């Protein structure tokens, strides 16, 4: 099946689970031409379509390592989180190992979705980095978090002041 035909079958909105299931039922390698499109659906928050496609990527027997490598560093924290929390934990070591450098780099960049911690979890699960290095980063994260809490408390006090 050609990409154009597959695109016509893709979901029309975030609730079009019938179309998402129909695409997934075609299976790999038939859906390969639209796998990037499927992956980008993972950016959509609270979407049945995204949930269906997450399950597909988590369970596909030929893991699309190159596709994930191209998108794991995305600016979309939601997409990155779905990949790190819902897809990669179900992949075997052989598929995760080529992503090792990406995971180590992302682990050093915190965000509001805790994607850095999800990276550390994968790194530890698959023994992809020295545990001393991980411990040092985690200690640094704890210090940063404590400083952030202190600053939030100062700002809360400022909110309480009467002018």
Image (cartoon, grey):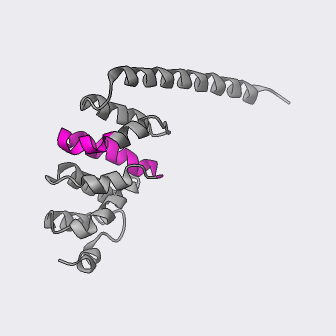
Magenta residues?
Answer: 75-100
Quarter occupied by residue 91: top left
Quarter occupied by residue 153: top right
**In the figure, is residue 112 to the left or right of 95?**
right
**In the figure, is residue 75 to the left or right of 87?**
right
Coordinates of residue 68 in the picture (x, y in percent): 31, 53
Does the stretch in magenta take in 85?
A: yes
**In the figure, is residue 163 to the left or right of 99?**
right
Pick the residue in front: 19 or 134.
Answer: 134
The answer to whether residue 92 is visible is: no
Above or below for 163 versus 4: above
Image point (19%, 38%), residue name? 93
Coordinates of residue 137 in the picture (x, y in percent): 45, 25
**In the figure, is residue 37 to the left or right of 144?**
left
Does the stretch in magenta take in 31?
A: no
The answer to whether residue 95 is visible is: yes
Image point (33%, 22%), residue name? 131
């Amino acid at each position: 099946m050609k990409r154009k035909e597959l695109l016509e079958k893709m979901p029309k909105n975030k609730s079009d689970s019938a179309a998402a299931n129909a695409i997934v039922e075609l299976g790999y390698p038939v859906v390969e031409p639209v796998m990037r499109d499927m992956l980008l659906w993972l950016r959509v928050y609270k979407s049945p379509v995204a949930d269906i496609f997450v399950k597909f990527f988590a369970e596909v027997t030929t893991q699309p390592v190159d596709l994930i490598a191209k998108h794991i560093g995305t600016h979309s924290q939601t997409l990155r989180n779905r990949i790190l929390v819902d897809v990669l934990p179900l992949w075997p070591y052989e598929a995760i190992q080529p992503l090792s450098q990406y995971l180590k780099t992302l682990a050093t960049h915190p965000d509001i979705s805790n994607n850095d911690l999800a990276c550390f979890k994968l790194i530890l699960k698959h023994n992809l980095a020295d545990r001393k290095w991980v411990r040092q980063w985690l200690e640094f994260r704890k210090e940063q978090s404590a400083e952030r809490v202190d600053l939030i408390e100062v700002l809360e006090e400022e909110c309480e002041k009467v002018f």
